Amino acid sequence: EALPLALWLTAVQPAEACFHFMTGICLQQLGKTEVASRFYAQTLLLDDADAGAIYRLAECLWEQGEKNEARRLFDAVIDRGREDGELLALQRAAQHRLTLH
């Protein structure tokens, strides 16, 4: 139910990274990882420091079989977590994902 609103907000405020990220989350939850990847990539074009978008893009790429690129992005999240204590939970999630695969 959130997808129509997320898409509308993205269309109305295309320069706002948070709306692209929100749309990506909605699509990813619906299993549309390829389309969600595009929204996460757009989020990163607007805000390249968004570790959440990097993590979510990595998840999508993993599901699409792009394992090497996904690993690279999970590693980037881990590196950012070392630099920013507020990203500790995300860093641990990325580490966990890498140990599972």
Image (tube, rainbow, N blue to C red):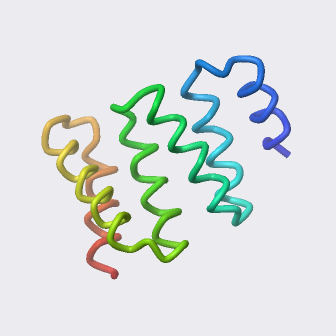
Q: Single out the residue that lies furthest toward the left.
A: 82
Coordinates of residue 60 in the picture (x, y in percent): 53, 62
Depth order, front residue of 87/34:
34
Q: Name the image quarter holding residue 39.
A: top right
Residue 22 or residue 12, whichever sits in front: 12
- Residue 95 image position (x, y, % from top left): 25, 65
Q: Indicate the quadrant containing the C terminus: top left, top right, bottom left or bottom right.
A: bottom left
In the image, 17: left or right of 75? right
**Along the line of sight, which residue is nearer the eye, 12 or 83?**
12
In-front residue for pair 86/12:
12
Task: Examine the rendered structure and indicate whether residue 37 appears above or below residue 14.
Answer: below
Q: Position of residue 94 (x, y in %)?
A: 31, 60
Residue at the image point whose x is 81% and y is 28% from the top: 8
In the image, residue 86 sits, relative to residue 97, either above or below, namely above
- Point 40% across, 47% down: residue: 54
Number of marks: 0
Residue occupying image coordinates x 70% and y 66%: 31
Q: Position of residue 85 (x, y in %)?
A: 19, 37
Residue 84 against residue 34 in the figure, above or below: above
User: Residue, x 42% and y 43% (percent of image)?
Assistant: 52
In the picture, measured across the screen, residue 64 lies left or right of residue 28, that is left
| 34 sits left or right of 101 in the view | right
